[in-house]
Amino acid sequence: MSTPDLPATWFERIDTSSDELFYQTPRLVQHIDDITIEALTAFYRTRLAAGTTILDLMSSWVSHLPDEVRYASVTGLGMNAEELAQNPRLDERCVHDLNRDPELPFADARFDAVVNAVSVQYLTQPLHVFASVARTLKPGGLSIVAMSHRCFPTKAIRVFHGAGGVQRLEIVARYHELVGGFDMIEKLDCSPPYGDPLWVVAARRGDV
Ligand SMILES: C[S@@+](CC[C@H](N)C(=O)[O-])C[C@H]1O[C@@H](n2cnc3c(N)ncnc32)[C@H](O)[C@@H]1O
């Protein structure tokens, strides 16, 4: 998918080598503070109903979903098989490089929600990915993109370098607007008083 409304320079990154190389070693670490993880889990608790079907996009060994909630299924898509194997919340695991192939390998209208935690800055073809998120969501389904301020700088695209919370929210809201199919696009600052910030874009897949 082309990006006629967005400058090509947004999507440049320092390390242009294959993501397979960068992610071949498992990183069993947390990328945000415990208190910020709690804030993200609390947000999921308010938006993701029990019994629904979830895709954790750009997943690893943790999904930050509330322990006590039983979903119909949780599918994790990421780059490292060992990280995904260690994730106890996942019912299904998929290793897939979204920068090599930005189309999600899932059927239309399969998920009630697609969540993406602290990883959107690594997508080099985000419009194609979010169009595919819209395709794989059920009507009325939710896309939730959570962001903070830490990153692997060589792998993050240029537009996120130095971007503050307001700009990050605008960028990701714009992704959802440009691909179409989403309504009720919310830009939320869910940051706890101390710890890493937490900015969330939540968008509803419109009825089709
Ligand atoms: C900072 S970690 C975040 C992991 C997890 N979502 C979390 O909240 O801890 C970035 C994740 O993005 C995934 N990722 C990075 N580039 C990717 C790509 N090209 N395609 C699919 N996933 C990718 C990696 O597998 C990695 O797990």
Image (tube, rainbow, N blue to C red):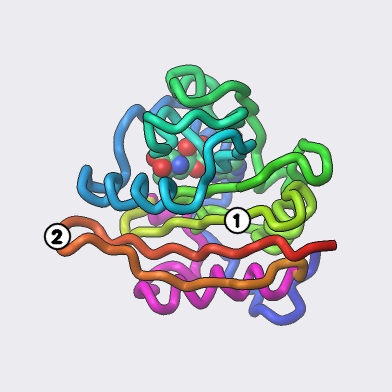
| Drawn side of residue 184 relative to residue 33, left or right | right
The x, y position of residue 157, in whole percent, is: 51, 62
Q: Amino acid at mark 2?
A: Tyr
The residue nearer to you, when weighing 5 against 50, is 50
Instruction: Identify the residue shown where x is 47% and y is 73%.
Output: 187
Reply above or below: 117 against 187.
above
Most prominent secondary structure in the magenta stretch? helix
Q: Give the SS element for disc 1.
A: strand
Which segment is the magenta one? 152-179
Is residue 59 a member of the stretch shown in magenta? no
Instruction: Identify the residue shown where x is 52% and y is 72%.
Output: 186
Q: Give the SS element for disc 2.
A: loop
Instruction: Identify the residue shown where x is 58% and y is 21%.
Output: 91
| Drawn side of residue 17 relative to residue 40, left or right | right
Q: Residues within 10 Å of mark 1 (few under 14, many from 20)?
A: many
Point out the tag, 2 or 1, that comes first from the N-terminus.
1
Q: Quadrant of residue 31?
A: top left
Residue 40 in view (yes/no): yes
The residue nearer to you, when weighing 105 against 150, is 105
The x, y position of residue 123, in whole percent, is: 58, 55
Q: Residues within 10 Å of mark 2 (few under 14, many from 20)?
A: few
| Drawn side of residue 168 relative to residue 6, left or right | left
Label 2 sits on residue: 194
Using the numbered discs, state the Cα–Cα distance from disc 2 to disc 1 in whole angstroms.
Answer: 26 Å
Is the N terminus in the top left, top right, bottom left or bottom right quadrant?
A: bottom right
Label 1 sits on residue: 143
Residue 22 in view (yes/no): no
